[in-house]
Each structure stands twice: as structure tokens, then as C-alpha cells.
């Protein structure tokens, strides 16, 4: 009995079970897979970035379109466009002490800029209702509202920040008035002063030199005496009251607004603080701090009879490598957006013809626009 049991147990031949393990990747195979994934990501990433930038460009153009529309609604309400900035008007440099007039430029309070004037017409009534427009922008009653961040004045492609910033003096320190620094909300959009600029010493000069013919480089002398409008040939300047009928070149052929990224210098929707300066964040041989008007205005050039080393008028369109705080500057690849006087929005490339840019920036020089040069 015991032998039978022993033999039958020994005779059992259990079949081999299936193999549960799988052969592993070799190192070469693994490296090949990683390389393929890397190539695919490399091909996909630029497409994703381009799609995101396309969306940002659309948002930016829509912001400028809203700004252009708001300016026309303002014109409908007041029969003029908003002033580049509002300053106590003087022809002799005399002013009451509360307006804090800058003796160099004759800039003074209240200082509110074009963008502040557009607030009720840009769906920003909540901010407009808090503004005390009859008081200087740096007054205690306005200290909170001028720090507001307003999305319609921000471009999503602009770097350099979108938060409020301290207004600076000539040496780059916070500007102090009545014992307080002035902190203002940021803007990535600016208004056009035209070809010529009248800020800095020009603002208080008795006379100034302007171009009579930019193609021939001829100039003439004009009286200023505190009136920047005798120099400016664009729609926005100190105490400007531009009307549609003043845009002789046509609103569809005159630039009103454009981009200026904080990567180059800081701009604000609030306005101009007397004695303040705009300081560049990008350095170039032609770049330096400029007067307070450049907190909210730019110009195209040529200006003040200035010629470059070749004897040609100095013109600086969007992204021109002078990188001046008084020019337009965009971080969209290839160029930047501008809003024309009729409310339309155009993309201007980095390779725009210089004289065409100057022609589009003036409102009453009588140029004939050749759009093929855009």
C-alpha cells in the first residue's frame, strides 16, 4: 500500500505554467523613445506658443479697439477728444502753489491724462465715480483710486509688470509731493503727440524749432509760450482739445493710440505728475530719462529740427532700436498694434517705412498716404 502511494505520487508530471515576465527595453531602445518624444515636444511647443500669442494679439487689438471707441463716445459727449493731459494753463509760468507747477516744463496739476478721461466711456464707471477730477491726481482724496489696475489698458503680451508703480524724479527716486510718494496704475497703451514733441524745456520755452518739410529737412521757428499746441501736430498734447474737424489728414490716416510695453518704460493711465521723469528699462546709446509728459504720451519724430549723423530727420516707429521712452514699443513678434482716429486697428510691422510712420502720426500735414509702404 505504501509503495503504491509512493509510486503514484512520483508518477505525477505537473505541466510547466505560463511565463509571467516580459523582456525589458534595452538602453538603446529607451534612448530612442526618449529622443522621439523630445522631437515631438519640440515640434509641438512652438505651435502652442504661437497659438497663445495669437490669442494675446487678439486681446490686445480688442483693447485698442475699445479705447478708440471710447474716445469717439467722449467726442460725442464733449465735442472733442480728451486732452493728452490737463495742466494749469499759463503763458508766463505763474500759477497757484497747489498745482505744483514744474518751473522747467510748466507742467502742473491737476494732471489727469487722456485715459483717465475715457474711464466713463470704457465701462469703468466704478473707477470714474471715485476720481476727484477737480483735484490734482496726487491729492489725498485720489490716492487710492489712482492705483487701480484697469484691464483694458493692459496688453497680455507685455512684460515688465502690470501692477501700480512709483512715479520717479529725475535721478530715479520716488517723486514726493506733500510728504507722500505718488503710486499710479499702469498702462501698456499711449496716445500720439504726432511727429513733433513738446515736453521738457519745450513746455516753457518762448519759441521752438519744428520741421517745415521732413523730406527736405527744412525747419521754422514758432512761438510757444506755454502752448504745446503750436508745436504738436498730433491729436494729443498738453491741454489739447482736438476735434474731428481738426484731423485734416483724415481719421483713417492718423494714429491716435498705440502700444508701449513696460519692458521699455513705465506708463500710466492716470496722467502726468509735475517734476516726474520716465526712466528707460532698456538701454541704448540714444535712450535716457525724459520729462513727465512721456508717462502717457509718445511721438513719432522727427522733432525739434533734430537730424541723425547722416543728416536725415530722426524718426522712431514701433520697436525702433533707439528704444526711447517717448516711442511706441510692443512685444508682439514682428510689430505692434495702433488705433487710428476712426477707431480701426492696424498691425504695423517693424519694417514700416520711416516716412510713412511720420505721415500717419501727424493729423494736419497734408501728406498723401501710400499704404504699400506699410
Image (cartoon, rainbow, N blue to C red):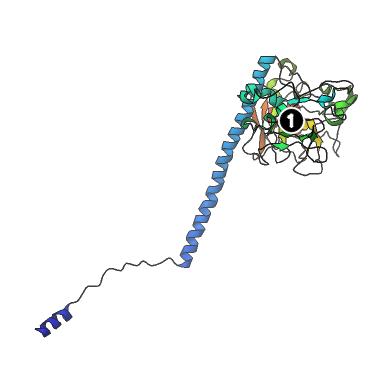
Any part of residue 374 in sight: no
Nearer-the-camera pick, 278 or 155: 278
Residue furthest out toward the left: 1
Image quarter of the N terminus: bottom left
In the image, residue 302 sits, relative to residue 49, either above or below, namely: above
Image position, residue 165 (x, y; %)? 71, 37
Please give the count of numbered marks on the rendered protein: 1
Looking at the rendering, which quadrant does residue 17 occupy? bottom left
Which x, y percent locates residue 208?
88, 26
Q: Is residue 292 above or below residue 118?
A: below
Is residue 262 shown to the viewer in this render? yes
- Mark 1 residue element: loop
Left or right of 226 on screen, residue 67: left
Residue 84 spot, x, y in % from top left: 75, 25
> Residue at coordinates 14% horizontally, 83% vertically from top-left?
6
Q: Residues within 10 Å of mark 1 (few under 14, many from 20)?
A: many
Question: Closest to the observer: 129 or 275?
Answer: 129
Which residue was labeled with disc 1? 296
Q: Which is more toward the observer, 275 or 237?
A: 275
Residue 291 location (% of width, % of height): 81, 33
Front residue of this view, candidates 92 and 329 = 92
Position of the C terminus, as image quadrant, is top right
Image quadrant where residue 114 sits: top right
Amino acid at each position: 500500500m505504501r509503495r503504491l502511494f509512493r509510486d503514484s505520487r512520483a508518477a505525477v508530471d505537473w505541466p510547466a505554467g505560463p511565463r509571467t515576465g516580459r523582456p525589458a527595453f534595452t538602453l538603446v531602445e529607451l534612448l530612442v523613445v526618449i529622443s522621439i518624444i523630445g522631437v515631438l515636444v519640440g515640434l509641438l511647443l512652438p505651435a502652442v506658443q504661437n497659438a497663445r500669442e495669437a490669442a494675446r494679439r487678439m486681446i490686445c487689438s480688442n483693447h485698442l479697439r475699445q479705447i478708440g471707441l471710447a474716445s469717439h463716445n467722449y467726442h460725442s459727449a464733449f465735442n472733442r477728444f480728451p486732452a493728452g493731459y490737463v495742466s494749469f494753463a499759463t503763458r508766463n509760468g505763474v500759477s497757484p502753489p497747489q498745482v505744483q507747477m514744474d518751473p522747467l516744463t510748466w507742467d502742473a496739476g491737476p494732471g489727469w491724462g487722456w485715459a483717465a478721461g475715457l474711464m466713463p466711456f470704457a465701462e469703468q464707471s466704478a473707477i470714474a465715480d471715485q476720481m476727484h477730477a477737480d483735484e490734482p491726481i496726487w491729492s489725498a482724496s485720489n490716492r487710492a483710486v489712482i492705483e487701480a489696475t484697469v484691464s483694458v489698458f493692459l496688453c497680455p503680451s507685455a512684460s515688465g509688470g502690470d501692477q501700480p508703480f512709483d512715479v520717479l524724479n529725475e535721478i530715479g527716486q520716488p517723486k514726493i509731493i506733500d510728504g507722500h510718494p505718488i503710486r499710479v496704475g499702469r498702462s501698456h497703451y499711449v496716445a500720439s503727440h504726432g511727429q513733433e514733441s513738446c515736453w521738457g524745456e519745450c513746455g516753457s520755452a518762448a519759441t521752438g524749432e519744428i520741421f517745415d518739410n521732413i523730406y527736405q529737412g527744412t525747419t521754422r521757428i514758432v512761438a510757444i509760450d506755454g502752448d504745446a499746441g503750436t508745436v504738436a501736430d498730433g491729436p494729443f498734447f498738453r491741454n489739447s482739445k482736438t476735434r474731428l474737424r481738426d484731423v485734416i489728414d483724415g481719421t483713417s490716416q492718423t494714429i491716435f493710440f498705440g502700444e508701449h510695453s513696460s519692458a521699455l518704460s513705465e506708463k500710466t493711465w492716470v496722467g502726468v505728475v509735475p517734476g516726474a521723469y520716465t526712466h528707460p528699462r532698456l538701454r541704448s546709446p540714444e535712450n535716457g530719462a525724459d520729462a513727465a509728459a512721456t508717462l502717457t504720451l509718445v511721438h513719432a519724430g522727427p522733432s525739434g529740427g533734430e537730424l541723425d549723423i547722416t543728416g536725415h530727420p530722426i524718426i522712431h516707429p514701433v520697436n525702433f532700436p533707439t528704444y526711447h521712452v517717448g516711442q511706441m514699443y510692443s512685444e508682439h513678434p514682428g510689430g505692434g498694434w495702433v488705433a487710428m482716429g476712426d477707431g480701426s486697428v492696424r498691425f504695423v510691422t517693424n519694417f514700416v517705412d520711416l516716412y510713412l510712420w511720420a505721415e500717419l502720426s501727424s493729423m494736419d500735414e497734408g501728406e498723401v498716404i501710400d499704404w504699400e509702404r506699410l
